[in-house]
Image: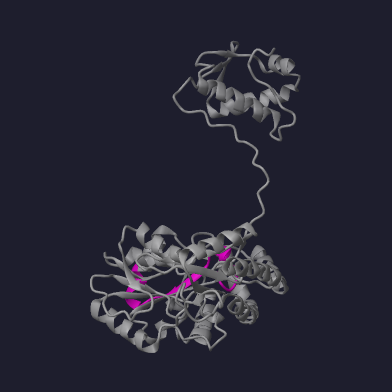
Amino acid sequence: MPSLPVTVDRADPRPLGIQLADQVRRLVLAGTLVTGDRLPSTRRLATELGVARSVTEQAWDQLRAEGWIEGRQGAGTFVTGGHTDVPIAPRRRRTPAPERALVRLDAGTPWLDARHAAGWRRAWREVSAATPPRGYDDPRGLPALRMQLAERLGRTRGLIVDPDDVRLTAGTTAGLRHLLAVLPHGPVAMEDPGYRAAVLTVRATGRAVVDLPAEAAITDLAGCCAAYVTPAHQHPLGRVMPAEDRLTLLTTARRDGALVIEDDYDSEFRYDVAPVPALASLGQDTVAYLGTASKSVAPSLRLGWMVLPSSLRASLDRHREVTHDAPAWPVQRAYWALLRDGYVDAVVRSARRIYAERAPRVVAALSPYAELAGPVAGMYSTWLLPQDRAVRARAAVRAAGFDLNLLDTYCRSARLTGLVVGFGGASDAQLDEALAVLVASLSS
């Protein structure tokens, strides 16, 4: 038996020296070895364990570097890190292979065409050959990308801006967080039902949330520092804010001294009518515009942009310059190449066509059993039905390998129940399978 209660496991993928170091460290933490205990020599322990001496030398070198042991000239090696009350970390267990992931039929997973993959790879190859900035980059974002976005916002959203008006963010919630950092104290009015991540972002800053009925005109923002809205495609009910309500909102915000925060998350994907111009195009002095690449390229890209009233730009730039809270340079550089080469336009055109083909199939399948909450646009539709039927239908599709959201999870004061059915993140065959399961559940 070895002079230390340690073993080596040759089936363990970790190096033998690391195994030994871990075991000695645990013996010290457990109090089995205490300060002053003498350890066997590397030669002796290697012989006892039947391993090369280099293995035990590696273990002792590691422990010595961490301060657990020390060598004394002519005397040997001794424990220096004595017993403490630090709990012993459990040995990491090998995790089983993950189960098959559910196909997401949610409101935020877009359709991506594999035929455009070459453009994606080309952009990232270009990034790999580019020279990154030596220090922290411009807190406003990559100038070339801001120029591309300014052009695109004017062309697709009717929002005429200068590149210096655009700020890059790490997504919509990051842009919202930046805004809240420079706004006066006060609650934020938010649509109900509404975007759950935005609500959590506001609450995480310590601000209260004031519920705004999602389909009513906004006529009172007294005491609120801002109102967060999704006017082009209300999330999740799908309503387009009427022109009269838009003007009423801007008038109310100016009168009550509140900022309007416009989340323009999927406006490019309308297929029933032309994309509705951005609310910010009617009042850049009152509206902070938030856009995102999540719905057109990929949610995991974590890239967005905002256009701010001129009164907020300097304070926000100073805040970001101090916090370095900006999207990663490689991501900005890649998205610039994707815009420049027409990749984003091509993906949006393809996705709009796919959504326009799929939406009627979803409506035809579900309309006999549920009521549409609003116009179908973008990559999802919302259906009103009793909670017990919605819960039962969701359980049925999950058992079949699909995941979708219940409408009540988007509500705070509102009392709406039903399903939010996305059709961007599935193949045609998967969508048909999920619809068949939903119909079977709702018709029983």
Residue farthest along the front direction in this orientation: 444
Which quadrant would residue 243 be assigned to in this image? Answer: bottom left
Q: Is residue 59 left or right of residue 135?
A: right
Which quadrant would residue 190 be assigned to in this image? Answer: bottom left
Asked whether residue 287 is in view, the answer is yes
At horizontal 54% and vertical 24% (from top left) the residue drawn is 68
Q: Nearer the viewer, residue 277 or 195?
A: 195
Quarter of the figure that contains the N terminus: top right
Asked whether residue 425 is in view, the answer is no
Q: Position of residue 212 (x, y in %)?
A: 33, 72
Q: Nearer the viewer, residue 403 or 235?
A: 403
At horizontal 62% and vertical 74% (from top left) the residue drawn is 338
Residue 310: say if magenta.
Answer: yes
Q: Position of residue 294 (x, y in %)?
A: 55, 69
Quarter of the figure that contains the C terminus: bottom right
Q: Position of residue 383 (x, y in %)?
A: 50, 73
Which quadrant would residue 443 be assigned to in this image? Answer: bottom right
Residue 233: say if magenta.
Answer: no
Q: Position of residue 410 (x, y in %)?
A: 43, 65
Q: Is residue 218 left or right of residue 172?
A: left
Q: Is residue 115 left or right of residue 207?
A: right
Quick check: 315 above or below 31? below
Q: Nearer the viewer, residue 311 or 75?
A: 311
Tell me the magenta residue range.
294-315
Q: How is the image coloured?
A: one colour
Q: Is residue 247 left or right of residue 364?
A: left
